[in-house]
Every structure is written in C-alpha cells, then in structure tokens.
Image: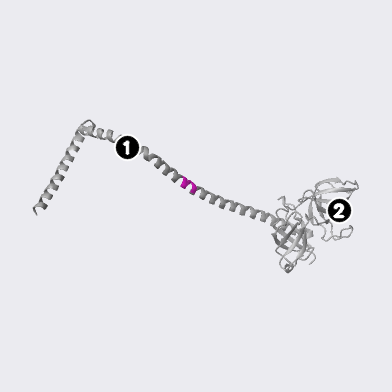
Amino acid sequence: MLISKNRVIRRRAIIGLLFAASLTLLTLSFRDGSNGAIGAIQRTAVSVTAPASEVTHRVTQPFVDAWHWTSGLVNAREENTKLKAELQRATAQLQAAEHAQISNTQLRNLLHFQHNPVSASYKSVGADVIAPPANAYHQSITLDVGSNDGVAVNDPVVAPSGDGSGAPAGLIGRVSEVTGSASKVQLITDPESAVTASDEKGGAKGIVLPSAGNPDMLQMINVPISAAMQQGDVIVTAGFGTGSKLQALLPQGIPIGTVTSVSESDSGTQKSIQVTPFVDFQNLNLVQVLKVHG
C-alpha cells in the first residue's frame, strides 16, 4: 500500500516539475525572443539537425519525384483513354451525319428521277445494295428485292448522280438474275456489258461499253464520223429498236452520262466518244429498279 502511494507522489512531482519547466521556458521565450537563451538553444538544435534533414531530403526526393511522375503518367494515360473514346464517339457521329446527308441527297435525286418522263412510264421499286462488286472483272451488285417485289430479268436499274450537282439519276445496269427476295444486277461497267445509246441532242447512235483504261469511265463506239457530237452532250439509252446489230434490252431515254471528249477511231471512219457516267459506281447504296419487263 505504501509503495503505491509513493509512486503516485513521484508521478505528481514529475508532472509538477514538467509543468513548471514549461512555464519557465514560455516566459523566457516571450521575454527574450530569439536573442535569449531559448533562442540560442533553438538555433543550436537547428544547426545540429539541419545536416540530417538535408540528407533525408536528398535521399527521399527521388522517391517523391518518382511517385509524382508515376501518378502523372497514370493520370495522363487515363485522360488519353478518355480523349480517344470521345474522339471515336465524335467520329462515329460525324460519319452517321455524313451518311444521312448522302442518303438524303440520293433520295432527293431518285425522287427527281421518278418525275422524269421515262421513269414515270413505269412502276419502280426502291432497293438497297446488299453486296458490292466482287472485283473489276465481275462488275455486279446484289439488291434486297426480287420477284416477290415484281422485279424481272432485264429490268433497268438506276441510281442517284454521284457529283451532288442535282443531275438526274443515271443508268447503272440491268437485272441479270432474280430470286424471290433478291436480284443480281450487271453493271454497265462490267466487261461483258454493252448498251445501245444515243446523243440526246443530236440523236447519233452507238454502243456504250466500259472503258478499257479506266473502269469508272465509259466509251461510246460505232458512232458515224458525220455525227455532230461535242463535249457536254448527254448520252441516253437508245430504246428497244433493232436498228443496230445489238438488240436493245432497255427502254429509251434513260440518262447514262455526259460526253467528256470526242475523237476519231484509228480507222478514221467512226468517232470514239468518252462518256463520264452520272453515277459514282464506287458508292452505290440506294437504287431504283424500273419494272419494264414484269
């Protein structure tokens, strides 16, 4: 019991001494400021610990810098990922808007063509291209309409003009195969294609074939040397007449393209006409089948 009392007394004494020492130090510090004994002690302590603090700073600084660099790199990568995702979304939205604008233009051109006297004479079926040409030697496309929609073999197929100039839709080919729900179209750019055509202004006739040197261009052959044709003339289908060796399969007056150049053949007895088609064959999406043979 006596030992416990002595311990309590000692603890209280120590606390009292510490409290008194604290008061003394505070009093001296306020009275003398940094020039007194307390200030000297503080300066001595700082001078003793400063080298150790400097060493500690130099040792730890590379680790602190590395941490900051790593954190910045992680944040930069996260920000880069976010920016890439935003760019992809913006690109997709832009592509969707451009596709919608192109489709809108094509629909307007098709509607304009429907009021053409040629197309107005026939019923028509709108279609989407579901398979593009396989290669340059087999120029054909597949449509999502067939005999169930009234499509028949040899029906002409037109598409909107590709230059955005408001020119009428142009001929792209004829139906070559039909199933109940789909049809295959042989394009006029196919090496096996041949279309009887005429100059809309002068009436000169010939045969339109794909150009050997440029698959996106056409040439008109068997044109009489006396034909008055010039650049800018519109070339259209010649009709069902049998005036040439090649019997026409398409009705008269469907626009094909414009004359780009006029020259004489190697024999000098005929003219060779270069024709630029109205349609961009590299971007066929919406087309129209004229129900001529159904």
Which numbered tag is attached to residue 53? 1
Q: Relative to residue 108, is residue 60 depicted above or below?
A: above
Question: Label 2 to label 1, Cα distance in Å?
Answer: 98 Å
Q: Nearer the viewer, mark 2 or mark 1?
A: 1
**Which amino acid, by three-letter code, is at mark 1?**
Ser
Which numbered tag is attached to residue 258? none
Determine which quarter of the picture holds residue 288: bottom right
Characterize the local packing of mark 1: few (<14), some (14-19) or many (20 or more) Cα atoms within 10 angstroms.
few
| Residue 76 magenta | yes
Residue at left offset 42%, top offset 42% = 66
Characterize the local packing of mark 2: few (<14), some (14-19) or many (20 or more) Cα atoms within 10 angstroms.
many
**Which amino acid, by three-letter code, is at mark 2?**
Gly
Q: Earlier in the sequence, mark 2 or mark 1?
A: 1
Residue at left offset 68%, top offset 54% = 105
Which numbered tag is attached to residue 206? 2
Which residues make up the magenta segment? 73-77
Decide whether the magenta segment is chiefly helix, strand or loop: helix
Q: Relative to residue 87, is residue 23 depicted above or below?
A: above
Q: Secondary structure at mark 1?
A: helix
The C terminus - image quarter: bottom right
Residue 279 picture location, percent across and down:
74, 53
